[in-house]
Amino acid sequence: MTGCGKKGPPLPPLVKLPIAPVEFVAERRGATVDLTFIVPAVNTDNTRPANVGHVDIYAATARDPLTPDEVVKHGSRVASVAVKAPRDPERTIDEDESAADMEPPEGRGLDQGAVARASEEITDAALVAIDPAKDSKDGAGSNGDGERPLLPPRSTPLSRTYVAVAVSPRNKKGPYSKPLAVPLVPPPPAPSAPVVTYDETAITVKWDPISGREPIQRPPADDALPSTPIGFGPIAIAYNVYDAGQKPVPAKLTRTPVSEPTYADSRITWGEERCYAVRAVEKIGDLTIESDATPAACKTLKDTFPPAAPKGLQSSPLEGAINLIWDPNTEKDIAGYIVLRGTSADSMQPVTDAPLQVTTFLDKVPSGERFTYAVKAVDKAGNAGPPSNTVEEAAR
């Protein structure tokens, strides 16, 4: 049997699209929503580099949960992050090939795989709710006025939903990220300015606590931010502490919000300045809302703390000399030890020109004459600690 076939029209080349941005996080701080994500570095077929030229972030406000399609279609683009793009999107390598065989992306944007940051200020425009069902019918966005029979009761608070999507240099969108809904209730009040103290082991940050707030119902016709949270029951207050000296973005020091108005930081480095800011935190559902930051409280760490007295000082007589030995101090900044000698405890004076680096000392003295000894530890900042126990001895 024989057969014949007809060659069809040529198929368009397969367009490589980047994966959705991962580790997409939205955090509300005061009137700002901070957004972070990982720039895509692979395509949906697991080849690399990703065919991405920029990442767009869309946002929309509503009372009901929104799908990514609804956010992108009916919302607005609130940020766009440029990304280094491949010169030829078809020249990719598979996931099991070495990165050395990959042609690196180029351009002025972020590196693929880098952490990207963006933010949006919550303005009056961001408080206008959309109605996807109505928008789909008449093609116009809701302005928040008039009858809206498809909306839930107005006791339901507004939320602003964010979606991130990577876009190819030819403006082809990849898959959407997971949507993140941020409640548009007011943030908690900021705590009082923190007070910073320290010792040789830790820096202590303290502030005045603020009380939790009871929810209230806002007036039915009011779409503005209410003066207090609504619809979630009593709201407990916790706190996040930030390293305000980190630039350009303060680093969060608390892994999870702390319930007590105090925080201990063990990062002691003498001579360095440490700055701290605190934000109050309210948890609503799975999301948290932070207050504005307190003014930064700074302190330059100066070592004014002497080491402890050495322990276990012992003496033994030798011919024309007295041998001393003691236990080493455990402080990490010990510079050495000073040996004190006198005919009595009240008359002891240093007998070493510089701090000893060892914990033994041989003192050559006249035979038969009795002396009293003690030892002090000295740290690298020049602080001398209290004397050790005293011993009395005479050389043979």
Image (cartoon, rainbow, N blue to C red):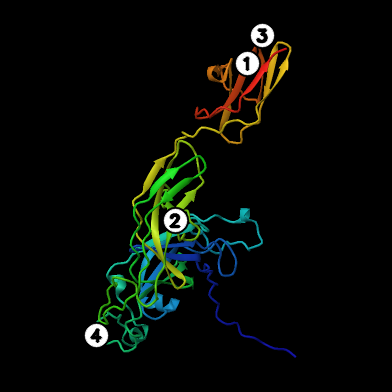
In front of the other: label 3 or label 2? 3
Q: Residue 148 occupies which quadrant of the picture?
A: bottom left
From the viewer's side, name the closer residue of 331 and 309. Answer: 309
Q: Residue 238 occupies which quadrant of the picture?
A: bottom left
Label whose residue precedes the other's in the sequence (1 or 2)? 2
Q: Secondary structure at mark 3?
A: loop
Q: Position of residue 324 (x, y in %)?
A: 67, 22
Calculate the distance from the C-alpha at mark 4 to the C-alpha at mark 3: 106 Å
Residue displayed at 55% across by 67% down: 43
- Residue type, mark 3 in image: Pro
The residue pinned by badge 1 equals 371
- Residue type, mark 4 in image: Gly
The residue pinned by badge 2 equals 109
Circle 1 residues within 10 Å: few <14, some 14–19, many ≥20: some
Q: Is residue 9 above or below residue 293?
A: below
In front of the other: label 1 or label 2? 1
The residue pinned by badge 4 equals 146
Calculate the distance from the C-alpha at mark 4 to the C-alpha at mark 2: 44 Å
The residue pinned by badge 3 equals 366
- Residue type, mark 2 in image: Gly
* Quadrant (top left, top right, bottom left, bottom right) of the N terminus: bottom right
